[in-house]
Each structure stands twice: as structure tokens, then as C-alpha cells.
Image: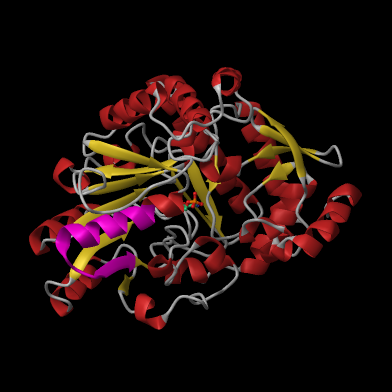
């Protein structure tokens, strides 16, 4: 139960903001509550307006891989702010960040910065359609790629959390341009290419799904996507908004050794400020204006504050930091597995690096249909149990939890102890 100040703020918020929040999952609807209003964050912890402190596993939905208010990030942002907050003109920082991105992801020869993951995927799709002269896109059930019209079909994240099948306001004609396939189902992708021969512009995928909870790709799934796209003249688009610079510096494509045609980035690359990106093969990216005719622009694109936060974050992300994230993630996974066993709770923990989900159902979750079989009441009770014990867990069964480099083994162990009590309770 949120504290009195949070409840008061939520009541005020609901009068002037739809549902009281600026992004739906924040409303805590799936966990039956009022969200704590956060006042500050430091390292792995956040504090709400009632003065309650929590170990945070949301981390601004995966953006804060080095933790809240990291001193180097703050220093970089302060310095950048002192030089001016926005110019709408080229700056040196953008060049350096673009160079870093191209170094980290060999499949990205050119990259364009935007302000949100939604913009990144929307622009990548426009580009894929322009490059192929085709209209259809293929996406996977339970993957979320932002809220652009053609992507709000069978989407994960808040759409899944609220149980919305599509979205009113998306014309049927647009929705019809999106073909859906189950995640991890290569046969479904093959048959879509057969059924819609010569019409599919691109296949967009979360290379590790995070928006139906954490669902890893099965061996061969991503490779099949890249190869089928190549064979059929479509573009493969890896939406690495969540996985980019998280599951490895070069994202899931580094981890699984693949080179998609286009990649979308967000979250970590902006170090907790509004920045995202799309990039890829030089011959495709050359079609973007002003080099080519595919239009895409942004007043605050490549914003110097966001660029400085992204650069400072990437600077910190050395190989030992990824080892630490892996070790902390593994410790949390093992502890949650133990807690499930000891409390005789039916559940499955799935993890890739520092992304993790505890699904309240038996057996592996391979797809959105599997994830949907989870016991959501059980999840809600678990979430409330954690929150009351000082753990801020993502407020939906269909979201991944994120470990940051600021978490300590003691944080993880305290979380496991809290989880055990929450499961037993
Ligand atoms: N793609 C993926 C994989 C995401 O996880 C998200 C956001 N959670 C988006 C796109 C959309 O990004 P944004 O919220 O910045 O628009």
C-alpha cells in the first residue's frame, strides 16, 4: 500500500493526467494499487515521497544500467547543461556517440539519433518499407516496439498488461499491414513469407523479448529470421531498445553473433535521458534524408544533455561491468529459484544477463501464449509482498526486471529473502 503522500498525489494526478500517469504500466493497475510517487534515486535504490526506500529493479525500464544518479553521468550532464541545453544544430558529442555505437555494433554502419524508442522503430520501419518498396511488416506476438500505429498489434508491455487486443484509433487498414507470428516459431515466419511472397518489407523482433516478461530466443530463431529476410529480400530489424548495451555492449546481436540489416536502440544508450537511435547497413541508411528521400527529423534529436549521459554511461560499461551484471543476474536467478522451491511455489525464472522474469507458471515460457498462462493474481500478491518489504519490482507479469551495476550482492540477497517471504505469505 502506497504511503499517504503518494496517494494524495495520485488523486491529484488523476484529475489532470489520464489515469494519473504518463505511461500506462506506471499506474500499477495489474498489481491492484496506487503507485508510490518517486522523489529520488541513488545507485540501486529509489525513495518515494513518503520517505520509503526500495531496492529498484525497474531502473527506468532498463535505462539505468549504471544505477540512479551515477556521479560520472551527473557530471557529464551538468557540464553539458552549462554549455547550453539544446541547439538544434550539429554538436561534437553526437559524432562521438555515433562512433561508439558503430564500434559496439558492427552491423551498424550509420546511425541516426532520435528521442524515443517509438521514434526509432517507427523510422526503421519507414526506411525498411522505402528500401524494399513493400508494405507488410512481420512482428511477433508479445513483442513491444513502441506505440506507432502499425506496431500496436499483438503488442506486449502495457498493452499486454491491460489486456488490450489492439488499440482503437489504429485504422484497420494500418493494422492489416502487420502480420503476427508466435515468438520462437520459425515455421510461422517461413509460412508468412510463403503466403505473402514479395510483400514483406521487414521482420521486426526483440532479439531477447522483454515486453512479455523475459523470453530468450531459442537456438536458431534469430538466425532464421536474418536468413529468411535475406532470402526473401526483406530487412531484418532487431529492436534492441531494451537489449542494446545491456545483454552485451553490442546487444543481443553480439551475444548471439548475428548481423541484422537494421537495429533500434534506446534506454541505456541515452543513459536515462530521452535518446534512442536507429541504424544499420550503409546502403539502407543512405536513403535517410538529407542523403536520401526517406524523411525523418526531430527538434531535440541528438540532444546534447542526452548525448552526454549516453556517452558517460557507455564509458562506464567495460567488460568487467558486464561480468558483474551477469554474476548479479545469476545470483538473483538462483536465489529466486531456491525461494520457489522452498515455498513450493509453481514458477519459472527466465534470465538473459541482467534481464529477468519470474513467471508464475510451470515450465519454460517460449512465447506470448505461454506467458499468458501465468497466474496473475499470484504475481500481484508477490509484487505487493516485495513492495512492502522494500523491493521495487516491475508492476506487471509481462515486464522484465533489470539488475544494474549499482546493485550489490547484499541488495540481491536481501531481495531474495524478501521474495521468499512474499512467496510464503
Ligand atoms: N522497443 C522496445 C523493445 C522497448 O522495450 C520499448 C520501451 N519499453 C520501446 C521499443 C519503446 O521505447 P520508448 O518507450 O522509448 O518509446
Instruction: State the residue in front, 419 or 30.
Output: 30
The x, y position of residue 380, in whole percent, is 69, 62
Residue visible at 60% across and 44% down? 58
Magenta segment boundaries in residue numbering: 121-139
Looking at the rendering, in which quadrant would you find the N terminus?
Answer: bottom right
Q: Would residue 350 be found to the left or right of residue 387 on screen?
A: left
The x, y position of residue 223, in whole percent, is 20, 52
Q: Residue furthest left?
A: 231
Instruction: State the residue in front, 68 or 299.
Output: 299
The x, y position of residue 140, in whole percent, is 35, 66
Q: Residue furthest bottom?
A: 172
Whether 203 is drawn above or below 338: the answer is below
Q: Is residue 145 magenta?
A: no
The quadrant where residue 107 appears? top left
Magenta region, main secondary structure:
helix
Residue visible at 45% across and 35% down? 88
- Answer whether residue 424 is visible to the viewer in this image: no
Q: Would residue 424 be found to the left or right of residue 324 on screen?
A: right
Residue visible at 14% across and 45% down? 283
Amino acid at each position: 500500500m502506497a504511503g499517504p503522500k503518494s496517494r494524495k498525489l495520485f488523486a491529484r494526478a488523476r484529475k489532470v493526467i489520464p489515469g494519473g500517469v504518463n505511461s500506462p504500466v506506471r499506474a500499477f493497475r495489474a498489481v491492484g494499487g496506487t503507485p508510490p510517487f518517486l522523489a529520488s534515486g541513488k545507485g540501486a535504490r529509489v525513495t518515494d515521497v513518503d520517505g520509503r526506500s526500495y531496492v529498484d529493479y525497474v531502473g527506468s525500464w532498463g535505462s539505468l544500467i549504471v544505477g540512479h544518479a551515477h556521479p560520472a553521468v551527473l557530471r557529464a550532464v551538468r557540464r553539458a547543461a552549462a554549455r547550453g541545453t539544446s541547439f538544434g544544430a550539429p554538436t561534437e558529442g553526437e559524432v562521438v556517440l555515433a562512433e561508439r555505437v558503430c564500434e559496439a555494433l558492427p552491423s551498424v554502419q550509420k546511425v541516426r539519433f532520435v528521442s524515443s524508442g517509438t521514434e526509432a522503430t517507427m523510422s526503421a520501419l519507414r526506411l525498411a518499407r522505402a528500401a524494399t518498396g513493400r508494405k507488410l511488416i512481420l512482428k511477433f506476438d508479445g513483442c513491444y516496439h513502441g506505440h506507432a500505429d502499425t506496431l500496436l498489434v499483438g503488442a506486449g508491455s502495457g498493452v499486454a498488461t491491460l489486456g488490450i487486443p489492439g488499440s482503437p484509433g489504429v485504422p484497420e487498414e494500418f493494422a492489416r499491414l502487420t502480420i503476427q507470428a508466435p515468438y520462437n516459431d520459425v515455421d510461422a515466419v517461413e509460412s508468412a513469407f510463403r503466403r505473402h511472397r514479395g510483400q514483406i518489407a521487414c521482420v521486426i523482433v526483440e532479439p531477447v523479448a522483454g515486453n512479455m516478461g523475459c523470453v530468450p530466443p531459442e537456438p536458431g530463431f534469430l538466425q532464421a529470421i536474418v536468413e529468411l529476410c535475406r532470402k526473401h529480400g526483406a530487412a531484418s530489424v532487431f529492436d534492441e531498445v531494451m537489449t542494446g548495451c545491456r545483454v552485451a555492449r553490442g546487444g543481443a546481436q553480439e551475444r548471439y553473433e548475428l548481423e541484422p540489416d537494421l537495429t533500434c536502440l534506446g534506454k541505456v544508450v541515452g543513459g536515462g535521458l530521452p535518446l534512442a537511435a536507429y541504424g544499420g547497413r550503409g546502403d539502407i541508411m543512405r536513403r535517410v534524408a538529407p542523403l536520401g528521400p526517406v524523411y525523418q527529423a526531430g527538434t531535440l534529436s541528438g540532444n546534447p544533455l542526452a548525448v552526454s549521459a549516453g556517452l558517460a554511461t557507455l564509458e562506464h560499461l567495460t567488460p568487467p561491468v558486464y561480468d558483474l551484471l551477469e554474476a548479479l543476474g545469476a545470483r538473483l536467478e538462483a536465489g529466486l529459484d531456491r525461494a520457489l522451491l522452498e515455498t513450493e511455489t509453481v514458477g519459472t525464472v527466465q534470465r538473459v544477463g541482467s534481464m529477468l522474469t519470474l513467471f508464475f507458471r510451470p515450465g519454460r515460457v517460449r512465447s506470448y501464449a505461454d506467458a499468458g498462462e501465468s497466474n496473475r493474481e499470484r504475481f500481484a500478491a508477490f509484487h505487493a509482498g516485495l513492495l512492502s518489504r522494500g523491493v521495487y519490482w516491475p508492476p506487471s507479469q509481462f515486464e522484465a526486471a533489470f539488475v544494474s551495476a549499482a546493485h550489490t550482492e547484499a541488495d540481491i540477497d536481501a531481495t531474495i529473502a524478501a521474495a521468499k517471504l512474499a512467496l510464503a505469505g
